[in-house]
Amino acid sequence: IHADLYSDCHVIPVGTADPVRAMRAADRLPIIMQSLTTAYDLVVVECGPADAQGIGRLTGDATEVFLSMLEADDEVTQAAVELIENGYPDLTLVTPLGHEPPGNPVPGRRTAAA
């Protein structure tokens, strides 16, 4: 657990374990989550692409589920519907404030991303 340099948050970074091997120990996730929710006021878990069954081991009574997106499209809509139909009716869709999708390339203009 590391202190965030820009806030009062603590962060557990993504691990380097093999995902298949790590999931063999997934039965310990509820114990880990209980420990974290006892120690902290708020626990945020970033699950990456996951379905309702995939996040089921992480959820508890006071769980709130947020579906992050850059743009609303059919894939986001389908994911939201599946989560709602599988027990997460209070799902919240979130997107970065001020996000603007990339525009079309301009002929003659060169850009680079760092």
Image (tube, helix red, strand yellow):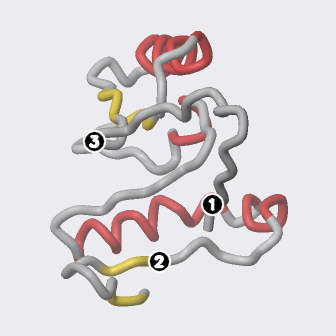
Horizontal side of 22 relative to 100 (left or right) equals right
Disc 3 to disc 1, C-alpha distance: 20 Å
Please tell me which residue is depicted at 76% across the width and 75% down the height of the picture: 17
Horizontal side of 46 relative to 26 (left or right) equals left
Image coordinates of residue 79 in percent, x first then y, are 55, 20
Whichever of callouts 2 and 1 sits on the residue coming sooner in the sequence is 2
Please tell me which residue is depicted at 71% across the width and 40% down the height of the picture: 108
- Total numbered labels placed on residues in the image: 3
Read off the residue under disc 1: 113
- From the image, which quarter does the C terminus lie in? bottom right
Read off the residue under disc 2: 12
Disc 2 to disc 3, C-alpha distance: 24 Å
Q: What residue type is labelled 3?
A: Leu
Looking at the picture, does residue 93 appear above or below residue 99?
Answer: above
Q: What residue type is labelled 1?
A: Ala
Residue 25, by quadrant, is bottom right
Image coordinates of residue 94 in percent, x first then y, are 33, 34
Q: Are marks 2 and 1 in contact (CB under 8 Å)?
A: no
Whichever of callouts 3 and 1 sits on the residue coming sooner in the sequence is 3
Looking at the picture, does residue 106 appear above or below residue 25?
Answer: above
Label drawn at residue 97: 3
Most distant residue in the left direction: 41
Please tell me which residue is depicted at 16% across the width and 67% down the height of the picture: 41
Dot in front, 3 or 1? 1
